[in-house]
Amino acid sequence: MKLSRQFTVFGSAIFCVVVFSLYLMLDHIDHSKNPNGERIQKGQLGILQDKIDHLERLLAENNEIIGNIRDSVINLRETVKDGKMFPEGNMSQGDLELLPPAPALLPIHSEDCQFAARTYSKAADGVQMLDVYDLLSFDNPDGGVWKQGFDISYQDNEWDNEPLQVFVVPHSHNDPGWLKTFDDYYRDQTQHILNNMVVKLHEDSRRKMIWSEISYFSKWWDNIDEQKRDAVRRLIESGQLEVATGGWVMPDEANTHYFALIDQLVEGHQWLERNLGVKPKTGWAVDPFGHTPTQAYLLRQAGLSNMLIQRVHYSVKKHFASQKTLEFFWRQNWDQDSSSDILCHMMPFYSYDVPHTCGPDPKICCQFDFKRLPGGRISCPWRIPPQAITDNNVQERAQTLLDQYRKKSKLFRTNVLLAPLGDDFRYTEAVEWDQQFENYQKLFDYMNSHPELHVQAQFGTISDYFEALRKSTGMDPVGMNVGQLALPVLSGDFFTYADRDDHYWSGYFTSRPFYKRLDRVLESHLRAAEVLYSLTLANIQKYGQPNDYPAVDNYKLLTEARRNLGLFQHHDAITGTGKDWVVVDYGTRLLVVYNPTEQARMSMVTVYVTTPKVRVLNAVGHVVRAQVSAVWNDVSHAAADLSFVAQAAPLGLSVYQLMEGMEPRTEAAKYMILQDGRQISISELEHFQQFYQQDAAPVHIENPHLKLSISTATGLLEKMSLKEDDSEHLIKVEFVWYGTTSNKDKSGAYLFLPDKEATIYSPSQPPVVRVTKGPLFSEVTTTFTHITHTLRLYNIQGVEGQSVEICNTVDIRGETNHEIAMRITSDLNSKDRFFTDLNGYQVQPRKTLAKLPLQANFYPMTSMVYLQDSSARLSLLTAQSLGAASLKSGQLEVIMDRRLNQDDNRGLGQGVLDNKITANSFRLLLEKRSSAEEESAPYSYPSILSHMSYMYLNHPLISMAVSQRSESPSLTPYSPLSASFPCDMHLVNLRAIQSKVRGGPSEQAALILHRKGFDCGFSNRNTALLCTTTRGKVHLEKLLTDLKLKSITPVSLSLMHTYNSDADPQEISLKPMEIRTYRLQLS
């Protein structure tokens, strides 16, 4: 393929990235925190509104960037017109374009089925969170000073033989956007915190501090001089300053996809390696609203040894405290040995602020938050203020504080105690540094100089604490061998979070779904741009550098997109579609189609054309079958949607030509319009025929795999038949409303507090039902007052034909305190069990518990939710994160949007009233089951078909229109791979690595692979996939068509650590579920 075309395509991919980055810049404001009322509760809707108003201007400015890229591409075309930079490959053009026929049955290696089929055996000393939920009564008695806990007592002589070792860890939690924007927080608070840190830590070598958010740290670093940078390096070398986690942000753990979790971790760690040479050892997550084992796995794979979590259900915290299991090895549900273990500390009390971290009594701990000394801006809500430490009061004060330390230590198994000292945006002013550090140092000096107290207290970093903990238990300093005082092994997750009463944080699983959808689109486009960019650079290195390819400029755009995506994963941001904006107008146009997946595929591409008289030609000049459909907001004009099935090689580019003119292989769709069961005729449909059916019987649409039966009155699905075995299932779709409780505390951005069970959505007037039948797809679109609901079947052999596409465009902007959900009721006997995924990485079995309130039975769904019985599985795959539940046997429910008039008292200071019209996309997949997994197993796996359907939904083909000018070189398809990857192997990313010396890319890229776990107990017929499974082995050099593998080195997930490997470097081998990174150089 000619070089200029390659870059045109890459430029277009960058366009996508840039435009979506702009959307994301708008929304670094969102979620909420401490219910102590200590935060300024300002109504911040204005800020959000201003941001949205800026969209037009930002897009206008952005046209300049796009113009620049386009100009460089055109210049490049002129300079390289004659030279052949990219060979057309060694296959004939015909082979390149048309994929070979797929086998009827997917060739799965029997060994690859053993992982999911193995029998479950629970570790003898293991804690399984599903069992904990069964065990707990979830009552909430008054625990005394520790309201959600119990009374703690101790004997004075308990520490006589081994003194208590206390590490006070100063920290400042900096949200990159919450009540203010990222830039406003930086200007008003963060830069002052970091500037004061340099001065104040240098004043006394005993002082310590930890920092976690690299997004802020990097902005500050760019603004300080070399002298100050050297001072920071000295603080890090001396161990006074520690970077914990080191990701771009402290990410949300419920709504985030693992692609984005990895991406923001790599971005932070790469920045640290380049600027500070630092390798974080310990994770610090005090504020995400519930915790996922996926994050524990990613931290372990990145080379971290320890982690800390805080926001866990108060009943779970109390139970763990009573059992002394607050410190544990967190192991993945699917892990058969201990390779995924990471040492984890769960904070025992209500919050991460000072009143809730020194011990069980917040009234006393607040007296040791010296920012609250009388005369300051904040005070203690318990009305007993702190006292500055003097010679006169130090004895009494030290003994009071030590009493809290001792009580807290009774909840743990060792004599090493962690006491965090900080809160949101703390240590802004020099005076606070002095108040905290000077007063605490006096207390420490007193404690340490009185041996009869049997205590050693000091400032420390979080890794200082874990180091001492490991030493005291005889544990390996970084490894996971358990040591003599065994800590328990825990598996499972920590959703759904409640911080008090029945206040479950299941609302934020859905809040602001527009941005959740946008986040997924950006992830897909960023990944596509990353892969194309890396391949483009490798081809340039192989065939010589065109002087004016803007490698550095494009790399800067990619970096900006990565960082915007990273900011959006912050636990106060991702709470968030646009129609395909490829428009093909008059004349002859070329359409370049990019396949971002590592599988050869046939998928539908739809573009907007200005005439229905169009023919589509593939790269070898053959006419391709196509369907034209009416554009329903513009039926009077000649515009139409043109759809055809594109074939694309893995990670490859296909080229199609669109020409004006009549073509028998381009067929127009036919329509039937119904209301209240009666047929309506539409006169304006000049290019399309209408069809009629005789009676009010259900409407049927079908394809080679499925047949759907849909009510003519409601336009909603009633039955679904699988053609493979002629089985019919009752599967009914409906919509329901939730209101909010009449109690004082109501639903808001975080909390879901419904008034009662949902009521069926019944619109005031009957909906309009539009039936479309065509050669490539058929669909039924039903327009209600608040929802436009579309069920579509693709007439394609293979993955896209095996599931029902559901699209719901929701508009509840006129509602008050309402949440709208889609409910799917089936005849599957699933009882109280269902399954949701965690971060698109793994599936977690769930149990609907009658002892919990309705809102507690909602869980985050990032990629899928399913239920099953012995003979079938029904999966709902999703293109955006939402909250999901199965409140009755055979039933799935997904909340699609929420509009709430009030704040829920978690600090945000506003309701959710900035709703946008939001398109939610899903695939509904019904599969026959042949093997039944054990009911008690704490893991479950999707089928290969389910994995692929999810990939197709979230990584659609990317189509880019290119005008065909007579002087431009001809376009040919591009296939970087000679075959598909194995069916269970996913290319997470191929990410260019920044050069250590200059701002552009180096010659290396990070190859990140994930081997998916899958269940073989499902049909693998007629998937049309061109892949096999290979026991986790990939021979990369054999897969590449043109490029050669110059070097490949196994590294930790975020490239911090390099591993020595004796294995054949050419052959990559992964275990099921494993995610691995390789440092790669192609040429």
Image (tube, helix red, strand yellow):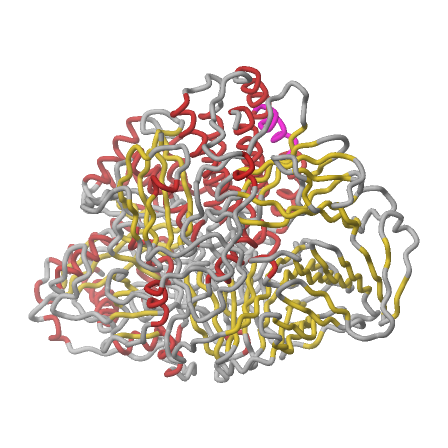
Write down the region rendered in magenta.
59-68
**Which is nearer the eye, 1019 or 226?**
1019
Residue 715 image-quadrant placement: bottom right
For image coordinates 34% across by 26% down, the residue present is 225
**Where residue 44 sits in the image (x, y, percent)?**
60, 51
Main SS, magenta residues: helix
Horizontal arrangement in the rendering, residue 137 relative to residue 528 (left or right) = left
**Which is nearer the eye, 1017 or 897?**
1017
Residue 240 image-quadrant placement: top left
**Where residue 717 sits in the image (x, y, percent)?**
70, 71
Q: Is residue 795 above or below residue 642?
A: below
Q: Quadrant location of the C terminus?
A: top left
For image coordinates 72% across by 70% down, the residue present is 716
The question of residue 665 being in magenta is answered with no
Horizontal arrangement in the rendering, residue 971 relative to residue 380 (left or right) = right
**Where residue 540 sits in the image (x, y, percent)?**
42, 25
For image coordinates 57% across by 62% down, the residue present is 510
**Which is nearer the eye, 100 or 892?**
100
Horizontal arrangement in the rendering, residue 681 relative to residue 993 (left or right) = right
For image coordinates 81% across by 56% down, the residue present is 670
**Where residue 282 sits in the image (x, y, percent)?**
27, 53
Q: Is residue 575 above or below residue 177?
A: below
The question of residue 66 being in magenta is answered with yes
Q: Is residue 771 visible?
A: yes
Q: Is residue 439 visible?
A: no
